[in-house]
Image: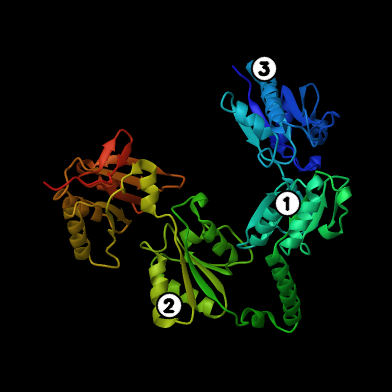
Amino acid sequence: MTGRLFGVGVGPGDPGLMTVKAVDLIRAADVVAYHCARHGRSNARRIAAQYLGAQIEEALTYPVTTEDTDDYQGRIDAFYTEAAARLAAHLDAGRDVVVLSEGDPFFYGSYMHLHKRLAHRYPAEVVPGVTSVSAAAATLGTPLVERDEVLTVLPGTLPPDELARRLADTDAAAVMKLGRTFTGVRTALRTAGRADEARYVERASQVEERQGLLEDVDPASVPYFSVGIVPSRVHVATTEQARADGARGASNASLLAPSDRDATPSTGLVTVVGLGPGSRDRLTPEAFSALAGADDVVGYATYTARVPHNPRQRVHASDNKVESERAAYALDLARSGRRVAVVSSGDPGVFAMASAVVEVAAEDYPDVEVRVLPGVTAAHAVAARIGAPLGHDYATISLSDRLKSWEVVERRLAAVADADMVIALYNPASRSRTWQVEAAKEILLKYRDESTPVIIGRDVDGPEESVRVVELGALEPSEIDMRTLLIVGSSQTRWVADRVFSPRRWPSAP
């Protein structure tokens, strides 16, 4: 049995910035390898020194660093081939090998050259580390990017004219590998018109750390372990605005009673948010942001309970049968200047609150902005658990007759069944509706073979999740409840082993 290879990032210099996982792997390693120049000193080893003990140490000494040579790349390639062979000997002997990498192993790290030579032969894992760019931004106390800004990471070894072009085209930048390239980098910054913004950080997070305006730095004093930062422009503007707003807010707050502050007019918004089928992993980043920014959360109690508690927010939970009233209440809050999130399970536009909010807003609240954020639907979540049953045309039908008559449901079921489409059946049953599944089954059997696969998905993404497949003829209506969704296959839907799929290609007509 071979050993395992680990590329471990030890961060920018401060041992306190190493991850717990990095420390645990170094302590447990049989072999610890690190790169160094011919003088024998290794920054990576220095950072991790307190965690070294009885491990075998392999110093991987570069044959060249900054000196001139007729065949630099050839000598470096030969060095990595020989270093990989040394580590392979340990791995073949069953020893676990940790290769230390300053910063992050896959961010201009030397480890990557060993990884490409060994990872296809041995179990390999990379443990990320804090990069010099992140450490530099923290040292400066200045974010790299904000909102929709683009960050470009550039090596200082690029020709100055190429650097200038790229610096002019980006919002923010980090320029690596300064040292001997510093003069060319500064020229590029000046050409791009970014020199006045640029900051300089040397040995970020270390005792010898130094930082300041890049224009003020003496080129002769710049080591390789330094970075140039052109930080976020948006952050400068938004910080000034936020501080001004804060000053005004503090002044105004002293003049207003609590009830007056609550009623202060501002621009409100209703955002209808799809929570997905259950797991927070299925919530989109856009939905996360809307929930975090809301002043009020409105919804059916079961769904508001799924939103993480935020003491800043007011939660308005209600019964499941008051959709229009709930929509009007949310719109009233928004009209008074509140930011309101109306939450729905799954996708809010599929048998959920989006329709109610948009309808009430169109009729009575044309002045209130309404946004709808989609979510993963119950049908798609159930389908994904079992394969691809919705791979061809399909329809979604609610079996609830609370908002439409059963005669309408019957006509639609018959029409879709006759059209030979896959059908996703929402709201199949409840405590007060116990006969609809049996009635729907009778209609479907007039058009579908008894062997048609039916997927029964219950509480998908919840603690009682179950997904199973039965034939239509064997479907037992008494086992179906409100937390269940049914997917009924078409004549082309296939059930093979534990997978169900509907081919995208439909057979040609005779």
The amino acid type of the residue labelled 2 equals: Ala
Labels 2 and 3: the sequence-earlier one: 3
User: Is disc 1 placed on a helix, strand or loop?
Assistant: strand
Q: Which mark is residue 89?
A: 3
The amino acid type of the residue labelled 1 equals: Val
Residue 502 versus residue 240 in the image, above or below: above
133 horizontally vs 290: left or right:
right
Figure colour scheme: rainbow
Q: Residues within 10 Å of mark 3 (few under 14, many from 20)?
A: few
16 and 134: which one is in front? Answer: 134
Quarter of the rendering containing residue 398: bottom left
Residue 435 seen in the current view: no
Q: Which residue is mark 2?
A: 361
Q: Which residue is mark 1?
A: 175
Viewer-side label of 1, 2: 1
Residue name at image x 66 percent, y 58 percent: 165
Find residue 37 and report its horizontal and vertical position in percent: 81, 31
